[in-house]
Image: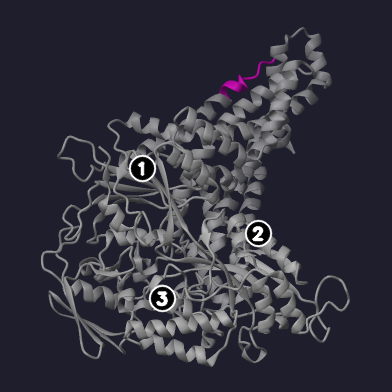
Amino acid sequence: MNQYLLKKFGWALLTVAFVVVLNFFLFRILPGDPARMVRDPRLTQQAVEAIRVRFGLDQPLHTQFLLYVRNLLQGELGTSFHTQRPVADILVENLWNTLLLIGPGTVLSIILGILLGLGAAWKSRTAIDYGILVASLVAWAAPTFWFGIILLFWGSSQLGLPIGGKMTPGANFAHWWEEWLDVGKHLLLPTLTYTIIYAGQYTLFMRSAVLEIFSEDYILTAKAKGLNSFQILRDHALRNAMLPTVTVVALNLGFTVAGAIEIESVFSLPGLGYTVVEAVGRQDYPLLQGAFLLLAVSVIFANLMADLLYSYLDPRVRVT
Amino acid sequence: MIRHKPLLGRVAIVLLICLLLPLAVAACRGGAAPASAPAQDTATNTPAILRVGWPGSPDTLNPGTGILAEAYTIYSLVYDTLFTLQLDGTYKLNVAESYEVSDDGKVWTFKIPTGVKFHDGQPLTAKDVAFSLNFYKAHEDFPYLNFYTLAFESIEASDDTTVVLTLTEAIPNLESQLLALYILPEHIWGQYTEGAAAAEYENPAMIGSGPFKLQEYQQNEFVHLVANPDHRLTPPKIDEIIFQTFGNADALVQALVTGQVDMITEMPSTAVPVLERTENVQVVTGTPLSPQLRDIIFNQLAPENCPAEDGICSGHPALRDRAVRLALAHATDKQNIIDVAMLGLAKPGLTLVASGQAYWYNDTLQDYAFDIAQANQILDEAGYLDTDNDGVRELPDGSRPLTFRLQWANDIPEAPRIAELLGQTWGQIGVKTEPQAVDPDALTAACCPAFDFDIMIWGWSWGPDPNDPLGVMRSDQIPTGSSESGYANPEYDQLYNQQAVELDPEKRKAIVWQMQEIVFNDVVYVIPYYHDVVQAFRTDRFQGWIVDQPTLELSDPSSLMTIEPVQ
């Protein structure tokens, strides 16, 4: 067990180190000059030179790299070229918004996906199964931004829900629960969008996994023992069927930290995805390096968690 | 029988914790934030809060390093300056009560009244004014504001009420240089003058002396301002303004329709008909305070002017010929481009000097008529014939077809339509285009000073003075990256230098008009259109918006200080 864990951690650390190096060189291959922020006659050649010095871009590349690694080891992510703010501050703010969106959305979509997938498999080849199947396919295949916009129009005009940001700016709340309510109202539509899109995917995975297990001999044995359908489902099918779903969830979790960008921009929740796209456009090297490091670490962490969960769900993984 | 522990139950508990955790943290964060009271809480009536929806957010609260227009909107509300630009295009004294100019035009003396206070209660004196101007002058790495100080030789406060600004040479447009030089409190900024500290200071409290004070700022979310009732000139009639960022245009429009915001600063052209039908919403269009234009850039760089260091200079040789550019101008249907790509919300353009720069705009120039036959005739006469009958003309020596790369920045939503329309009409005169959308950074890299392109669709936005648009076409800007056409004309360069120091407005105007005529005749650019600004507000919330001036900008301080709640 310990060796298994150590090996996994070792690989994770190695990947992070690789990402650190890649991050530095990757963005510097992009065309353009971050010091020449805008094409504007007011931005004179002298100003560009002065900005380059301030950003440290006048140093040779290897010096810049050593400085970057040294600062990173001291926990310094640097200052954003675009906003002149510490990268760590920006990332924390954005990560927070992202988590607010994908946290509840992920949990709800997992629950919904597992339940619907189980239900569909249990009632396979019935109207219920086909209904769930079609709905899941549509949800999974629908363009996220389109689906989000539809919900946005419907929610704001029919239900009077707010459609921008995570809470009403400038509001004074008399009670903590009023503030919660306000945040909840703002997050309802984006969370709903996220939940429906991802639940569709999880339902499909869960359904096919359960169906596969239903054809196994031990299910037949369980039936022969006289267990009822619910017992079979709970005790024999669910745990085994969880494995592929955990994989997908873990993969998604890592990527949605960056990948909820469509929902973020439809509902004006400035999260990490939004920031990364902006930063690429502005060649904000420090912010890009910080953001990609964070994204890489989340993907690696999510995978590590999946591995650990695997060994919990499937004892065979622990042995091998 | 072996019974597993109830798996679903455990998973459910874990999931529930995950679900509630963010909310719990939200509450903690919310509790830690200052529970701020509105500006005037003494009265029992609720404060008048204007909610503005806009698509952007300030990049920084530090005026030294600001780039985005949204940042400058906030600066102009929170800070005072020596001069402000009014919607009729004239300049007005702001923090100074009077000024004198020496006979040679080089020494400007401003009188700062006593009793002006910063938002933190400290007095604003001539020393703060001198400090601010010196501060911008000292920091070459301030992308915009340093530029405005280039003509300053020294700035001194002889006492608390007198600022003496000495110029290296007399310039005709000092007022326009002072518009964005915001007066900062020395007692705060004095400790951030050295090196990178000046640029990296986040300016979280944003203490200024303007008509509004900063209450709270969340980047990419909102800027919350409250009125400064003690403002010397113009105390606002509303209590608070909240600028809220919307990540996409549809949500922005919907927020106005549902009354979640009271005004929006821009919208897609497609939303105009919908909003015009919406009850209690008024759409207004006009000439923007900062003129904005779309340009079609011809790479006409002569080989001998190719920048030694950065030049790639791969432009098509035919574009160096005025006849070809003239034919392309005649084959450009500007009105159709405006109707199709801009849904009519723009005006046909002439040169880089935009119609919004009213006084300086030469409106006597007669635009090249859209005339395919004439365009064909020009190319025929110049010897560009289709010798191999493939529908595309060749150079007079037959060596190369008139096939041009046509690139545009992919952040211009209407550019693909423009390129398509150009391809159609230019195709009718035997010119082929190879259209390509390019990332703005890649376009900059190809543009200038590399000159690795044939034709580009791009755009500009200017201040009120004609120096900027005219300066772009100077030959000494070819190696610096400012010139995008590679145009070189010694006569033009000389006129530029002349107008830059001509103090008599009428004489300067004559030179500026002559320069526009030169570049128009040389067909340096084709300007398909000058943008209209399109904004909208709710008529059931606030009244008194200024919409009858030569330029339109609802988020201009003048409008925001005039409006009052609808009773």
Q: CA distance from mark 3 to mark 2?
A: 31 Å
Q: Which residue is mark 1?
A: A169
Q: CA distance from mark 1 to mark 2?
A: 37 Å
Q: Is residue A314 visible?
A: no
Looking at the rendered structure, the kind of residue marked 2 is: Pro
Q: Would you call the spot at circle 3 few (<14 residues within 10 Å), some (14-19), or many (20 or more)?
A: many
Q: Is residue A83 visible?
A: yes
Q: Residue B360, labelled with which disc?
A: 3
Name which quarter of the figure residue B162 lies in: bottom left
Name which quarter of the figure residue A208 lies in: top right
Residue at image location 79% in from the left, 18% down from the top? A125
Query: Which one is nearer the viewer's eye here, B182 or B201?
Result: B182
- Please state, as top left, top right, bottom left or bottom right, where the C terminus of chain A lies in the image: top right
Q: Would you call the spot at circle 1 few (<14 residues within 10 Å), some (14-19), or many (20 or more)?
A: some
Evaluate whether label 1 is on the same chain as label 3.
Answer: no
Numbered range of the magenta stretch: B1-10
**Secondary structure of residue under mark 1:** loop
Residue at image location 66% in from the left, 68% down from the top? B407
